Image (spheres, grey):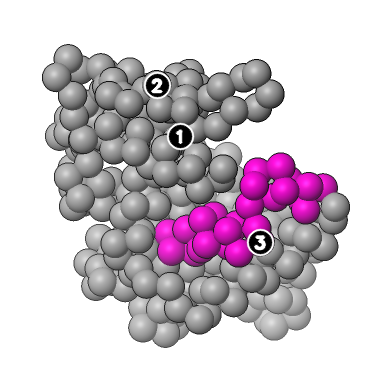
Amino acid sequence: MKKQFTAAIAGMMLVTLAGCTDASAKLKDADTVLFTVGNTTVTKGTVYSMMKSSDTAGVITTSASHYIADQEIEVTDEMRTSAEETLASYKEIYGDSFTSYLESSGMTEEDYINEYLLAYEKEDKLTEKYIEENYDKLIEEYKPLKATILTFKSEDDANAALSELKDGKADASEAAKNHNSDSTGSSSIYTLESTELDAMVRTVLFSLGADDGWQNIISSDGSEFYLVHADETDTETLHDDIVSYFSSNSDFAKKIKTFYLNKYNFRLYDIDAYNAVKESYPEYVVQDGTASE
């Protein structure tokens, strides 16, 4: 039953994405029976109507992403091991309820690994693939570096913390805690697109080298005081950190998805599907001229 249901969904997605004559997709075999439960008969048309009345945009964009990842990424032993470990953790956390979920869905554990967990493993690898293939371009565009930024409400606190840092009496975390700052003192990746940065901090930060030491900066509106240190600017040294940063950045993930939707000529012909995706994910309606990169 599960495989029939999956095949039916795949077929309906092809109808939705591949085209129709009246801008509203219809199933030629809508009356085909998928299964019966007691006196209830479920057809392809029934399931299609349910799909269109639920999260249409989510179903379509997720299915498109999985299709693209299937074309671009081959499953490795490492990915399968990761999927199996995820399954094991789900079983440990959810216990019998997870087993019941699989049984009620008509899935084996192997089905769940192949149809769900590996699909998302491949999407993660697709993101990494894009970043690696475009690494030099990303460095040029985003200018990533690793820095520590401490924020203070008073100039006296900032100056006192700076004195401790220069004298070596405290590390960044301690200096922040000692002088009324909520900053963690941790080192993080920042780019030209890091919107959380004050404009003045951004200007100074991206002019610094790793040997320039701590800088005392007043915010653009004069309401806050910052201590800024460029910890590392060599992008080869930072390679893994930079890949991790872009991989976990939701805004960047949308850009990657848009790129691949363009590459695979993603088109929506069904008017209901088009409107649903347009409303929820307008950047993914690439047929309207969304930039490919």
Residue type pointed to by label 1: Gly
Q: Secondary structure at mark 1?
A: helix
Q: Which residue is mark 3?
A: 109
Image: magenta residue range: 97-123
Q: Is residue 75 left or right of residue 186?
A: left
Residue type pointed to by label 2: Asp
Q: Are marks 3 and 1 in contact (CB under 8 Å)?
A: no
Q: Secondary structure at mark 2?
A: loop
Q: Which residue is mark 1?
A: 58
Up the image or down, 153 lies above or below 204; here it is above
Q: Are marks 2 and 3 in contact (CB under 8 Å)?
A: no
118 in the magenta segment: yes
Quadrant of the image occupied by residue 208: bottom left
Label number found at residue 242:
none
Q: CA distance from mark 3 to mark 1?
A: 24 Å
Residue furthest to the right: 96
**Mark 2 or mark 3: whose residue is earlier in sequence:** 2
Q: CA distance from mark 2 to mark 1?
A: 25 Å
Taking depth in this image into account, of 231 and 59 the one nearest to the observer is 59
Quadrant of the image occupied by residue 239: bottom left
Taking depth in this image into account, of 211 and 268 the one nearest to the observer is 268
Provide residue 270's location: percent of width, then percent of height: 26, 23
Provide residue 86's location: percent of width, then percent of height: 66, 65
Residue furthest to the front: 39
Q: Which residue is mark 2?
A: 31
